[in-house]
Image (tube, coloured by chain):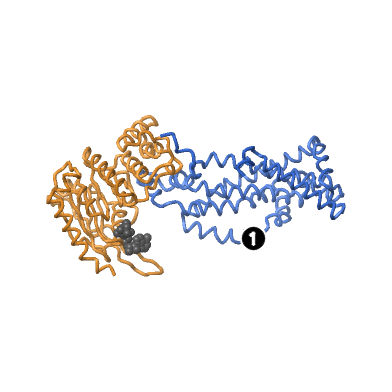
Amino acid sequence: MARVNAIPGLSALIACVALLLIWDGLSRAFAVSGLPPPWGPLRELPNLLTEPETLVNILASLRRMAIGFVVAIAFAVPIGLMMGRSRAVAAFFNPLFMVIYPVPKAALMPLIMLWIGIGDMAKVLVIFLGVSLPVVYHSFQGARSVEEKMLWSAAAMGLSASQRLRRIVLPAALPEIMVGCRTGVVLALITMVTSEMIARQSGVGNIFFTALDMGQYDTVYAMIIIIGALGFFCDVGFEAVRRVLVAWAEPSHQIAVGSA
Amino acid sequence: MNGGTVLPLVGRPDRIQRVATNLIEIAAVSKVYDTSQRGRHVALSEISFDVAEGQFVSILGPSGCGKSTLLYIVGGFVDATSGSVRVSGAPVTGPGPDRGPVFQEFALFPWKTVLGNVMYGPLQQGLSRTQAATRARELLGLVHLTKYESFYPKELSGGMKQRVALARTLAYQPKILLMDEPFGALDALTRKHLQNELLEIWERDRKTVMFVTHSVEEAVFLSDRIFVMTNSPGRIRKVFDVALPRPRVRAELLVDRRYQEMVVAIEKLMDEQEPELS
Ligand SMILES: Nc1ncnc2c1ncn2[C@@H]1O[C@H](COP(=O)(O)OP(=O)(O)OP(=O)(O)O)[C@@H](O)[C@H]1O
Ligand SMILES: [Mg+2]
């Protein structure tokens, strides 16, 4: 293990190559047009990625995803924190979220389109809904488990209830909030693609499903690779941000040694 | 918080006298916990005592007799069911920077460094960053943690965490320290070190201290007065005045007859009430 980890990214590279080989093997075994070997889609990738139209679509998708994600965080974190610190607030919102929770958010797409049309807003709203719930849930859990004595210490210093929520509960719950946000990133990507399947005008989902309808399987699989890569890079980027924000909470191994 | 009987100050010279000397006045404080599963539990019953300014008082008693509850009520973190607590003559209605708590669980802010933790109170009081840092460094020197100011709480040992917690509380200069078994989670040696440090610090500015502990030796070593409590319902059983000279040195106290006799007397009293527990 130690030697594999010595070169950064090596194990990931090995996993990718293994995946391609399995894919190749499966496509030979089944020999259907819906499962071409990976080499066609791989050759298609540079073509797709140099086409301005694809890039415009990817950017449009990312933009909606980012807006939905950020708005969801701005909404879900305060609500979750207040739910975690006040029984009344929790009692008010809990039933609401319990009802919304099991509904697949993309399934609401047709309805939402009836309300506010098929534009960007509808898709952003669906992404917002998808991201909000895990973030609310984890913010709630994080806020609920904040050590009471910490809040008392802050109260003795003169922090008001709202100051304690922002300056004690928020940072104390941040590691848990980040767990919710990470789930939120993945859900944002999923709802983004499904929303573009239902309302097709632009986006990676649009290219994907249009290619699927026309039987252009190389493009279809190239898009799957692109969507997968988007997810991967979003996650890596998010993890980098998370590490910086909650380094104080990570179990430490080397930090304390030698600096005294 | 339910106000107790408030006597008018006018025409009561004895009362005015008391306001001037007693920093903390605990009058007939009771606390009943109403739990859905176990019903009503009387944790404290009619506790009354005063603490003079500059006094170091300890509260001893069996587990569950309400020592923490009493301290939390004085701190304003928990409301009394009846009775009143007055600090500097004014009724306690909530937490305030005049009463600084130190908990057994440290309760440091883990996202702040040692320095950040100690600066928190002074910054909240409106000091500039430089002023707050200066004051915080002074206190870190007092608790021998100067070298650790950039450490995060998770990187510290239990004894170091409690030193930071003490420094953090001292930093906003409370009149009263409320310490709930602050050394309870520490090993015997660290505990002795911290007792010595606490006494040294206390002897500088003679803050008023309410100190909850399970250790009779610790209480006698540190205090001017000791309140021994009984179990369910929590009541004051006996008050001991510790007339040992200060500054106190552990090695001298250990061979001091008065110290030994007081420890034995309190231990005996506490053994007697053991059967009440079950
Ligand atoms: N939040 C609460 N709800 C219900 N009962 C409580 C609560 N807090 C304390 N009690 C009860 O009140 C009694 C006194 O508790 P308290 O923590 O004050 O005791 P203590 O003397 O500090 O004990 P220890 O020495 O073990 O710390 C106990 O019987 C406890 O079960
Ligand atoms: Mg206790």
Q: Chain of mark 1?
A: A
**Which residue is located at x 65 percent, y 46 percent?**
A68
Instruction: Give how far across and how far down residue A157 sits, in percent.
Output: 36, 43
Q: Which chain is blue?
A: A
Q: Which residue is mark 1?
A: A102
Which residue in the rendered view is the most extreme toward the top? Answer: B130
Instruction: Give how far across and how far down residue A30 sits, in percent.
Output: 85, 55
- The amino acid type of the residue labelled 1 equals Pro
Left or right relative to B254: residue B141: right
**Which residue is located at x 70 percent, y 56 percent?**
A108
Dot 1 falls on a residue whose secondary structure is loop
Vertical order, A192 against B273 (above or below): above
Left or right relative to A197: residue B150: left
Quadrant for ligand 1 reads bottom left
Instruction: Give how far across and how far down residue A89 sits, in percent.
Output: 50, 56
Vertical order, A259 against A229 (above or below): above
* Label 1 crowd bin: few (<14), some (14–19), many (20+), radius 10 Å: few
Instruction: Give how far across and how far down residue A93 sits, in percent.
Output: 54, 58
Colour in which chain B is drawn: orange
Q: Pick the residue in front: B207 or A104.
A: B207
Number of disc labels: 1
- Of the 4 image quadrants, the one containing the C terminus of chain A is top left
**Which residue is located at x 62 percent, y 59 percent?**
A101
Q: Pick the residue in front: A12 or A143.
A: A12
Task: Residue B268: name its quadrant.
Answer: bottom left
- Of the 4 image quadrants, the one containing the N terminus of chain A is top right
> Can residue B159 be seen by looking at this rendering?
yes
Q: Pick the residue in front: A121 or B161.
A: B161
Left or right relative to B236: residue A53: right
**Which residue is located at x 24 percent, y 66 percent?**
B274
> Can residue B1 be seen by looking at this rendering?
no
Task: Residue B42: name its quadrant.
Answer: bottom left
